[in-house]
Amino acid sequence: MTKVPIRGSENIDADAHDKEWTEYTDAAWGHMIPTADLRYMSEFIFLIDKYSSEKTRNMLEWGAGFTTRWLCALAEKRKAELFVTVDTNAEYLSQVIAFMPPSPYRFEAHAVQEIGETDDHSRSPAFHYATFPLHFEKHFDLIFVDGRRRNECLMMASILQSDHGHVIVHDYRRKRYEAGMSYFDVVEDFFGFRVLRRRRDLDSFARGQFEKLSKDASTFPVAFDMAISQNI
């Protein structure tokens, strides 16, 4: 079994028994990891460590998966207060979090409908996938966009990003995501990821939208398929 060190893995101890990611299998997930994914994970681990700090308190992920595990490890390392992961597939999300250890921070995993129900007047009364994080009435210091409806999620990320925060988007080379990324300045590009920060000329607008949209948001209905909260 060949072991392949992952760039940045020395900084985030996601597996206390083995700090190296193997190209054959990952004990925590219990199944094989394609060799092609090693570069993906190496970049991701390096970036989340680089663009987080002791100021990182709230973290958000759209699109659960392997990355959820590493973000959980980062949340523990940074002594974060809240990590939220959002997906549209309840069964898949259940599999992702099945191996998660108890966390010293507030960890919430939510399967939320991509669009949500509409009534006879075509009005959606509930938060859906992209708008759901407003429910927490918090700014997020590190946001990872890797799920459905990425342009919508990027637009919401521009409102939810804290003043010192960063947004990381996967598959940024896809032409269709340029609309969502137009709310940001590019900080750094990697092979599979782009690091963003909200454009300074949008800061005032974003703060105003946050205050407007998040006001009493915790009392609004959510188009849930599944919600799991873990805080030990």
Image (spheres, rainbow, N blue to C red):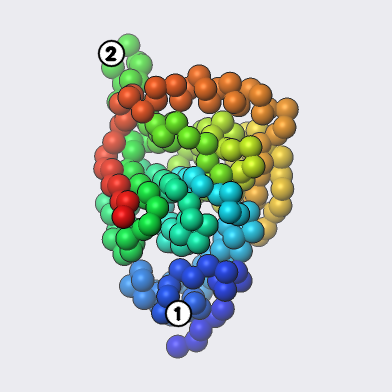
The reply, left or right, for residue 202 in relation to residue 80 is right
Which of the two discs, 2 and 1, labels the residue nearer the N terminus?
Answer: 1
Quadrant of the rendering where the C terminus is positioned: bottom left
Query: Horizontal and vertical percent for residue 74?
Result: 50, 59
Q: Residue at x 68, y 27 (%)?
A: 202
The reply, left or right, for residue 226 in relation to residue 56 is left
Query: Horizontal and vertical percent for residue 211?
Result: 52, 22
The reply, left or right, for residue 115 in relation to residue 197 is left
The image's mark for residue 185 is none
The image's mark for residue 18 is 1
Q: Which residue is at the front of the view, 70 or 32?
A: 70
Q: Residue at x 41, y 79 (%)?
A: 17
The reply, left or right, for residue 202 in relation to residue 122 is right
Query: Horizontal and vertical percent for residue 11?
Result: 57, 69
Relative vertical location of residue 32 with respect to residue 60 in this rendering, above or below = below
Instruction: Say if residue 174 shows up in the picture.
Output: no
Residue for badge 2? 120
Relative vertical location of residue 2 with respect to residue 189 in this rendering, above or below = below
Relative vertical location of residue 204 with respect to residue 32 in this rendering, above or below = above
Residue furthest to the bottom in view is 1
> Mark 2: which amino acid?
Asp
Q: Secondary structure at mark 1?
A: loop
Looking at the image, how many numbered discs can be counted on the residues?
A: 2
Query: Horizontal and vertical percent for residue 179?
Result: 63, 34
> Mark 1: which amino acid?
Asp
Q: CA distance from mark 2 to mark 1?
A: 55 Å
Q: Residue at x 44, y 48 (%)?
A: 81
Q: Residues within 10 Å of mark 2 (few under 14, many from 20)?
A: few
Quadrant of the rendering where the N terminus is positioned: bottom left
Q: Nearer the viewer, mark 2 or mark 1?
A: 1
Disc 2 + disc 1, Cβ < 8 Å: no
Q: Which residue is at the front of the view, 130 or 138?
A: 138
